[in-house]
Amino acid sequence: MAIIHIIYHSDRGHTERLAEAIAQGVDGIGGCSSRIIPVEQAAEQHVTSCQGLVLGCPTHMGNVSSAMKKFMDEVLGAVWMKGGIPGVVGSAFTSSGALHGDKEFTLLALQITMFQLGMTLVSLPPMSIPENKELGYSHGVGTSVLGRQPSMMPSEDLEVARQLGRRVAEVAHKLYD
Ligand SMILES: Cc1cc2nc3c(=O)[nH]c(=O)nc-3n(C[C@H](O)[C@H](O)[C@H](O)COP(=O)(O)O)c2cc1C
């Protein structure tokens, strides 16, 4: 069984909806199981006891939110000091208010930390994932909220999040089962 942990921060619920969709994608792959963990409750054991780790947070000031940064420095920093989590499969997701909103930088900030831990990051290429043609990020999920309530998030964006979960799960399953 490949266990995929989805650790996320969300103030208003948009990023949480992406986390839920990613979990649905994971759970749709046989032999894989997801667990969603709010970043405020996430500890070292959640990082070291999984075969896949997906991190997500809202874009705040063109970067990761402070709750996620605290987790990165305190918890992921401690894991890094002990050798990281080499090979664990991962990817990242974010939401922002504006259409662009500098989401790209948030994804990259999450991902560079994952590389520091030695993780294997999966891509989400729009060429082979038709649902991702409109969002068009090749290395994670980046949704624009544009004043919508969390309940009104576009189904296409949630489908891309499901696809991300599927890809992380499929690769983790191939590597670790
Ligand atoms: C402190 C703060 C900074 C923000 N900075 C940005 C930003 O740089 N770009 C942007 O498009 N939206 C920005 N936003 C809007 C959030 O990214 C957006 O509302 C996000 O979808 C919230 O996710 P959540 O519902 O999971 O908390 C900011 C919001 C806050 C509270």
Image (spheres, grey):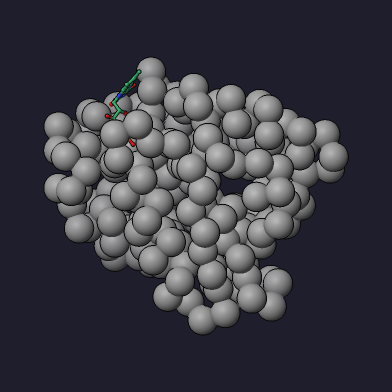
Q: Quadrant of the C terminus?
A: bottom right
The spot of residue 111 in percent (x, y) is 57, 40
Residue in the foreground of this view, choosing between 148 and 93 = 148
- The structure residue drawn at horizontal position 52% and vertical position 59%, both measured from the top left corner, is 35
Q: Quadrant of residue 10?
A: top left
Q: How many marks?
A: 0
- The structure residue drawn at horizontal position 43% and vertical position 44%, both measured from the top left corner, is 93
The spot of residue 119 in percent (x, y) is 68, 50
The spot of residue 32 in percent (x, y) is 55, 73
Q: Quadrant of the N terminus?
A: bottom right
- The structure residue drawn at horizontal position 42% and vertical position 75%, both measured from the top left corner, is 28
Q: Single out the residue that lies furthest toward the right.
A: 82
State left or right for residue 125 relative to residue 120: left
Residue 16 shows in this picture: yes
- The structure residue drawn at horizontal position 29% and vertical position 61%, both measured from the top left corner, is 159
The spot of residue 176 in percent (x, y) is 70, 72
State left or right for residue 99 relative to residue 59: left
